[in-house]
Image: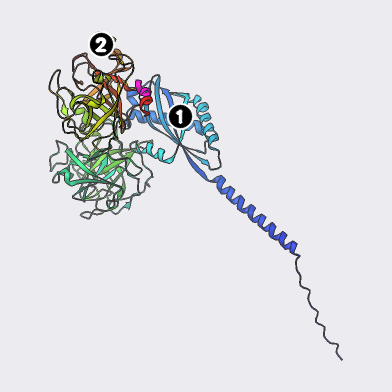
Amino acid sequence: MYPSSVVRARKRACFQPWVIGLLTFISLIVLAVCIGLTVHYVRYNQRKTYNYYSTLSFTSDKLYGDFGKEASKNFTEMSQKIESMVKNAFQKSSLREEFVKSHIIRFSKEENGVLAHMLLIFRFRSTEDPETINKTIQYVLHEKLQDAVGPPQLDPESIEIKKINNTETDNFLNNCCGTRRSKTTKQSLRIVGGTQVEEGEWPWQASLQWDGIHRCGATLINGTWLVSAAHCFRMYNDPARWTASFGVTINPPKMKKDIRRIIVHEKYKYPSHDYDISVAELSSPVPYTNTVHRICLPDASHEFHPGDEMFVTGFGARKNDGNSENHLRQVQVDLIDTKICNEPQVYNNALTPRMLCAGSLKGKRDACQGDSGGPLVSPDARDIWYLAGIVSWGDECGQPNKPGVYTRVTALRDWITSQTALIFKSNRIVNGKNSPAGAWPWQASMQWKGVPVCGASLISGRWLLSAAHCFATKHNSEDWTVNFGTIVNKPYMTRKVQNIICHENYSMAGILDDIALVQLTEEVSFTKYVRKICLPEAKMKLSENDSAVVTGWGTLSMNGRVPKILQQAFVKIIDNKVCNAPYAYSGRVTDNMLCAGFMSGEADACQKDSGGPLAYADSRNIWKLVGIVSWGDGCAKKNKPGVYTRVTAYRDWITSKTGL
């Protein structure tokens, strides 16, 4: 008999509840630590951009006038030297990994030297303390720049830095010519069958459109002027039917402007391609943004060299006789020696000194129809871009031995200046020329009981600056009105006066403290014809022979007739020592005054111009009110230039009265 089988029950293994809880707790702790370490690692290594606006004093063996002009050769060289010194200072410090770049945006003159205005850009870990960062940057600049070898001779103790946000940084850079946001690859990118451009890569490119249809390219050279090719307007020359659009697409554009007028070079004669250049004035200024701002114009003496890498951009066809493109395209080309382009198998001596050629003798890389008038650009060592050429002509598109031919900008640099810097065309208010509408939108006519008596300058929505002597015997504000616009008896806008504040120390005897503020009863609505002028900083300095403009409706000669249209005069700043010479004003010009005009007597303000503006354009083409027409000996007399109230001397007084 077999024993009965016994089935043993297996004892189930189990954990006590407290063990399960402990394991869960430990797992959560480990998970939390892992997450924390990951977050800490990511956060610790994540970098944030810090931007600073910095000023630095220095002295140089060069005169300020040699490098004070933006985009000039001397400006570039001085900027490079200072930027290199700053870069070396940080590379020798604990911030070598965090430092990205320094960028000079402008220079300004001060009493004992020159002030460099500079952007500093860093990338710090997001965990860093901002206050510590500021102190470290200050310390490095103070200490390391002591070892910088000039010229120029830097003053590290003068360093001031201020943290700014990305918007402020963009505004500074956008007001500098030739800056761009993204870099294009140096591979061969063709307009003929090429690739599209990203927004902001070529912010100066414009599309010129006749009745809304793209015809040509153009290049923005300042807030109101474009440069293009003369042949674009050979058959289509009515500015009212032209518009300019900006941005990488024609439709939709980033911005669109009407054309006020078109100026074609007087020596351009079709069918010749020589002097193929024109300028077009926009109906209103372009506000600079990341995607729309100006290119730099090279000095007439600037040299581009064969083999230099350049880019040409446009909305033109991708093949010969093709259709224009809606999206901007780009091509990298090489500058080709003119001698090679004039060889028999190429263009057989067709190129003049006012032309250059660029592309490839192998073909394929070229501009095409619809690109005419567009920019050929080249960067300098600071990655600032200059307009080297204007798309002009060629033999079809992208053919072997037939590179593109461009108008040489340096050869026609002076012509561009003569046409776009209109102030240089009118030598005097005495026997002067009329100002274009909207050219000087801050100019106002002060009218006493409806009669024009003086000029004034709009400095805010409700405040104007004028001369105290205008109100010496006419105190009642209710008797005064202010007219805005170019035609004095047909104002664009009129405002009543609420209050007149003459300087408390004004003295008629010596024309001392000849400055007054005029408060309007209501705000002015800013338009393209009525806008305020900027006030200069109190420490701003002008140099002898700096150019300025005086405007007004004053008499055209001593005791002569009064014009109806606003007059303008180009004048030069004259050193006070020269003005105070015995044969001039014999010591009567104080430090609170400045002289402007010509000792030869060729240009001046005159009667009833009193109180009007003396305006100066800085390196960024921002106009500043530097003087107020005050007094003089006659009008445009030899050795008797105009004397103006120096606005910088009264900057604090203006602020104390207006809060501006």
Q: Amino acid at mark 2?
A: Tyr
> In terms of depth relative to the viewer, which is nearer, 349 or 34?
34
Q: For residue 9, what is the image quadrant?
A: bottom right
Residue drawn where x is 18% and y is 31% of the image: 435
Residue 360 drawn above or below residue 136: below
Q: Position of residue 219 (x, y in %)?
A: 26, 41
Q: Magenta part of the protein: which range?
A: 649-653
Q: Label the magenta part by its dominant secondary structure.
A: helix
The residue carrying pointer 2 sits among few (fewer than 14), some (14 to 19) or many (20 or more) residues within 10 Å by Cα, namely some
> In terms of depth relative to the viewer, which is nearer, 75 or 304?
75
- Tag of residue 585: 2
Quadrant the C terminus occupies: top left
SS class of the residue under badge 1? helix
Of the residues tagged 2 and 1, which is closer to the observer? 2
Residue drawn where x is 44% and y is 31% of the image: 54
Cα separation, mark 2 vs mark 1, equals 45 Å
Q: Say which residue label 1 marks.
A: 85
Q: For residue 590, what is the image quadrant?
A: top left
Q: Position of residue 214 (x, y in %)?
A: 22, 50
Q: Is residue 269 magenta?
A: no
Q: Amino acid at mark 1?
A: Met
Going from N to C along the chain, the mark reached first, 2 or 1, is: 1
> In terms of depth relative to the viewer, which is nearer, 535 or 86?
535
Quadrant the N terminus occupies: bottom right
